[in-house]
Image: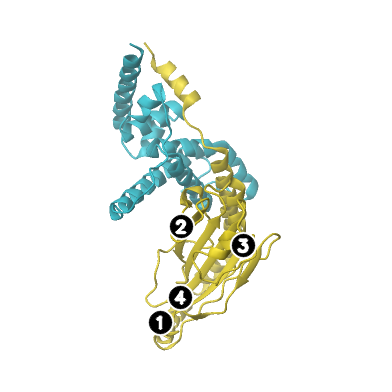
Amino acid sequence: MPDTARIERKLREHYPLPTQIATELAREAVRHAAEEESRQAGRQPRLRGRRRRRPILIMAGAAIALVAAGVAVAVSLLNVTPPRFSAAQGWHVGSTPTHSCDVGVTRGRCVMAEAWASTVPYRDCPNCVPPHKTLATLPPDGIIIQLTDARERPPYGTPGSWPTQIRASQVTRGPFEGVRRTNLSYAQLVVRSPHNVEHFLFVWFGRPHPTAQQLVRANAELRTVRS
Amino acid sequence: MAPKDELPADASTVDALFDEHWVTAWRAAYSVTKRRDLADDAAQDAFVNAVRSLATFDSSRPFAPWIAKIAVNRARDLLRAERRQNLASLDETTEAPVQVQVTGLLAAVAALPSEQREVVVLHHVLGFKLGEVAEIVGAPEGTVASRLGRAVAQVRQTTEAEHA
């Protein structure tokens, strides 16, 4: 009859362990979070000092800023900074200027700008999803990142942190509607940053399951985005 | 109140914490989800959140129960979110989640109700004391002890039936 100690020993030996890929992806994400935390920690003391010294002034300033912001929002046109990826080695990058979201949509209602980063020359229009021509030339190790940053009234999307990271569990195996090729995979995300900039992201991989190296490479390029 | 000992979020501290406690966080998350993909996400999120909150962590206390608690809570959140999503898209075709095929003792543990499976893994696999398990799962220590007793009895019964 198996006793508790034996059950415990067998469980400790055989209970599942994380895969190497999951471990490396998590290590990368945790390091990135630690770097961000260190940067923010360097800025916090100054903010705290100001808050302690002049709380009334800050509150009055905030009230004035809120009123001014309300007036500005009511009358102004929207704007969004065009996102840009870094042209790291092996990446082809590009972006568009800011424009209204569609024909007939005013810049007071919705504006957007697109950017892309691809390991092969990008051959499609900036917001063509899927990017047919580029996907046709994408090798198994290839990656295409398409990003649209938008600002609209009312804001859309789930609030989240940006730049984001792609995880293996967020990747869907092909096919994608309208694409003949089936040996591909993709991740699709929508994130709204704290400043109400909406980030619509597609990441395409040239194989049904991206390798750990592909995910790390895509995430490294995603972190370079400036928007 | 005595001042807390704070852990710095510098790279070497974080790397050391990750190396020492990643498997604990992952196994704790897996005890909730029974799925590798969700356990990967939950454990990673737990570590990222822990790193962001290191300034509030009292380093005179052990790190392992803290990270395990964050991982268990995150795993529960992800499961709940996925259930909501599945309910919202019942008409869509979705791929079956990846589950690990297990036999024998592991299958007996996997078949336990989630609240029993969690305490078995936290106590017998990860070596947490009953008080720590109680804090991690958010239940009284007596409840944890009775869950553990029932779970072990069930596992014994299942494995004996297999060997009979």
Mark-to-mark CA distance, 4 and 3: 24 Å
Which residue type carries mark 2? Phe
Which residue type carries mark 1? Arg
Chain under label 3?
A
Q: Which chain is cyan?
A: B
Q: Secondary structure at mark 4?
A: strand
**Nearer the viewer's eye, disc 1 or disc 2?**
2
Which residue is tagged 1?
A: A109
Which residue is tagged 3?
A: A118
Mark 1 and 4 residues: CB-CB less than 8 Å, in contact?
A: no
Mark-to-mark CA distance, 3 and 2: 18 Å
- Give x and y (percent) for residue B49: 49, 51
- Give x and y (percent) for residue A40: 57, 61
Residue A151's mark? 4
Q: Earlier in the sequence, mark 3 or mark 2?
A: 3
Q: Earlier in the sequence, mark 1 or mark 2?
A: 1
Mark 3 and 2 residues: CB-CB less than 8 Å, in contact?
A: no
Mark-to-mark CA distance, 4 and 2: 27 Å
- Front residue (pair B32, A88): A88
Which residue is tagged 2?
A: A176
- Give x and y (percent) for residue B26: 48, 38
- At x 33%, y 14%, the residue is B160
